[in-house]
Amino acid sequence: MKTIRIEAHGGPEQIKLHESPSPAPGPGQALLQITAAGVNFMDIGGVNGMYQLEPLPFTPGVEGAGRIVALGEGVDHLRVGGRVGWFFVLRSYAEQIAAPIDALVPLPDTIEDETAASLMMQGLTASHFATETHAIKRGDIALVHSAAGGVGLMLTQIIKLLGGKVIGRVSNESKAEIARAAGADHVIVESGGAFADEVRRLTNGEGVHVTYPRVHHHVLTREALLTRSRQLFDWVESGQLKVNVGKRYPLANAAQAHIDITSRRTTGKLLLIP
Ligand SMILES: NC(=O)c1ccc[n+]([C@@H]2O[C@H](COP(=O)([O-])OP(=O)(O)OC[C@H]3O[C@@H](n4cnc5c(N)ncnc54)[C@H](OP(=O)(O)O)[C@@H]3O)[C@@H](O)[C@H]2O)c1
């Protein structure tokens, strides 16, 4: 099977296609055929060495969606052929992956693989931000950075669903349109860090109730993974939450996806299609 392999830390030039044997699912694991793998900003840190989640050489990627092709010992409540999404499973930039079943979320027929792959990290992060990091109350005003990005678009929509107001910050005018379309009440176009004065002006000097952090790691219990995913799927099914896939890349072009996400030109979710 094909995977992406990083043999030395560095920039996108280190992202290379590699041929390796399919992994065998161990006890408590399922072997998955990946149909869409999500690109997250944290993957950049994995490649350049800022986050060392695994020793070199390694395969980046932490989320995706696909189909179960084999089950490891002791797994009896899932079936071969079932569709699943997954949250934080290392080595997701690949055609296949052996994943612990606790990280898997069975997908309803109404949720397409690409939608699920877009929701697992960024959707769950956004819902965690808006319900746990600072639980939005009706009338709260939130500042959302990179509001047209993957997390930003989800977070903006969820804050609005919960009755809050959003001031989005983006780095150019074309992104401002996308952030407004997601529901942002005000959008500040700025990339250098001088947005605070504009926030004060927009809030009559009062400021916002919350600015969501740009770097944040959270761990979900199995129960929270299932209930939060269910809520995201319900919102998508009812049309209240839109998933915006900005661009799809063949697995072999993963380096280009990293170049694009750091160029600040992308909007929405970037997906690798193996
Ligand atoms: N993916 C996750 O699950 C997750 C979890 C926790 C935290 N986060 C954090 O949420 C933020 C967004 O992550 P994401 O995965 O959803 O990706 P994303 O928003 O789709 O990332 C792309 C956007 O990040 C901004 N950006 C890119 N390079 C930048 C730079 N050098 N300096 C400042 N901004 C830059 C750009 O937006 P603008 O040009 O409009 O600023 C760009 O369009 C990241 O800071 C990430 O660490 C993500």
Image (tube, rainbow, N blue to C red):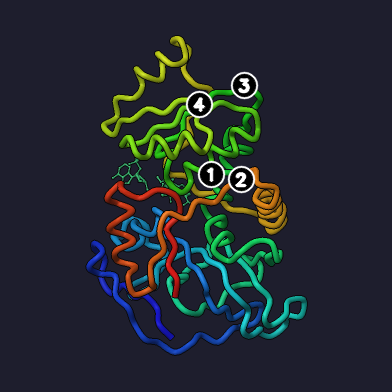
> Gap in Å between the C-alphas at discs 2 and 3?
20 Å
Q: Quadrant of the N terminus?
A: bottom left
User: Does dot 3 land on a helix, a strand or a loop?
Assistant: loop
Front tag of 4 and 3: 4
Other residues around mark 3 within 10 Å, as few (<14) / some (14–19) / many (≥20): few
Query: For the residue with label 3, is its CB less than 8 Å from the closest atom of ligand 1?
Result: no
The mark nearer the N terminus, 3 or 1, is: 3
* Type of amino acid under label 1: Met
Callout 2 secondary element = loop
Q: Are marks 2 and 1 in contact (CB under 8 Å)?
A: yes
Q: What's the distance in space between the residues labelled 4 and 1, CA to CA?
A: 15 Å
Marks 2 and 3: which is nearer the front?
2
Q: Is residue 197 above or below residue 2?
A: above
* Relative depth, front residue between 123 and 173: 173
Judge whether 40 appears above or below 9 on screen. above
Residue 82, position as x, y percentages in the image: 68, 76
Instruction: Identify which residue is drawn at 66% across, 24% down.
Output: 138
- Please name the residue that numbered disc 1 is placed on: 154
The label number, if any, that marks residue 241 in the structure image: 2
